[in-house]
Structures are given as structure tokens and as C-alpha cells.
Image (tube, rainbow, N blue to C red):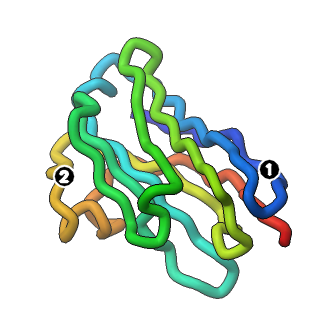
Amino acid sequence: VQLQASGGGSVQAGGSLTLICAASGRAFKNYGVGWFRQAPGKEREFVAAINWGGSTTLYADSVKGRFTISRDNAKNTVYLQMNSLKPEDTAVYYCAADESLYLIHSIVVLTTSYEHWGQGTQLTVSS
């Protein structure tokens, strides 16, 4: 499966934005998907994950209550709705997928749990 992230941009603090992860491949509906982000000089960090059917989601504490991950398997797409954005949310955001992803926190937070990665999309939040 190939992934392409889009939807990034510049927004003021308190604003909202939705990132899109579009996938190619008929089997995408079988893949768990995660969003990660990487700020300059920092390591890539977990943001959110969703299981293949969309029934289970997990979030990093830093985004819980502000971000919502969802998916539309008919459109081979996963979304990350981001509200109440803060300057510290500024980063390059990546989506990743794996057919064997278990929605357990200790697993979804690891970059090594995902076989497929998309290119990043930049989000800049100004104060």
C-alpha cells in the first residue's frame, strides 16, 4: 500500500485543520493506521492511531480531546481532525500503516510497528 499525506498548512493558535492520508491498494481496509509528527530537532512522535475497521482509536496525551482520527475505507482515506491547535503542534505530520497493527498503546507508539509510510505534510501553528 502507498500512502500520501496532505492538508497541512499554516493556521493561528486556536484554529482547526484536517489532515488527510490517502492510500492506494484494495487491501487498505485491512490496515491499521497511525499519525506521527516530527518537529525540528526532535524525534518522530506518535499522535493517533485507528484500527482497520475504525472502531478503536488511541491518542497521545498531548492531543487527546483536541484531535480526532477517523477513516473511510470506501475512499481509502484516514483523517486527522485537529482542533484548538497550539504552537507546539507545529511539525511535519506523517501517516503510516501496517496490516498487523494491534491497537495497544505500547505498540502503536513505535515507528517500527508500521511497514508503510507516506511523505510528510507540514503544519505550522502561529501564536
SS class of the residue under badge 1? strand
Residue type for callout 2 = Leu
Q: Which of 39 and 70 is in front in this view?
A: 70
Drawn side of residue 118 relative to residue 15, left or right = left
**SS assignment at label 2:** loop
Residue that appears at 55% across and 65% down: 37
Q: What residue type is labelled 1?
A: Gly
Residue at image location 32% in from the left, 52% down from the top: 115
Q: In which quarter of the image is residue 70?
A: top left
Quick check: 25 above or below 62?
Answer: above
Q: In which quarter of the image is residue 94?
A: bottom right
Q: Locate the C terminus and report the quarter of the image it occupies.
A: bottom right
Left or right of residue 47: residue 38: right
Q: Where is residue 91 in the image (x, y as percent from the top left)?
A: 67, 67
Query: Crowdedness of circle 1 by 10 Å Cα count: few (<14), some, many (20+)?
Result: some
Percent across and percent down for residue 113 are: 26, 60
Image location (x, y in percent) of residue 58: 30, 55
Q: Residue at x 62, y 50 (%)?
A: 83
Can you identify the residue that label 1 sits on? 9
Where residue 60 sits: x, y (%)? 39, 67
Q: Mark 2 points at which residue?
A: 103
Q: Which of marks 2 and 1 is nearer the N terminus?
A: 1
Location of the N terminus (image quadrant): top left
Closer to the camera, 61 or 105? 61
Most foreground residue, 112 or 109: 109
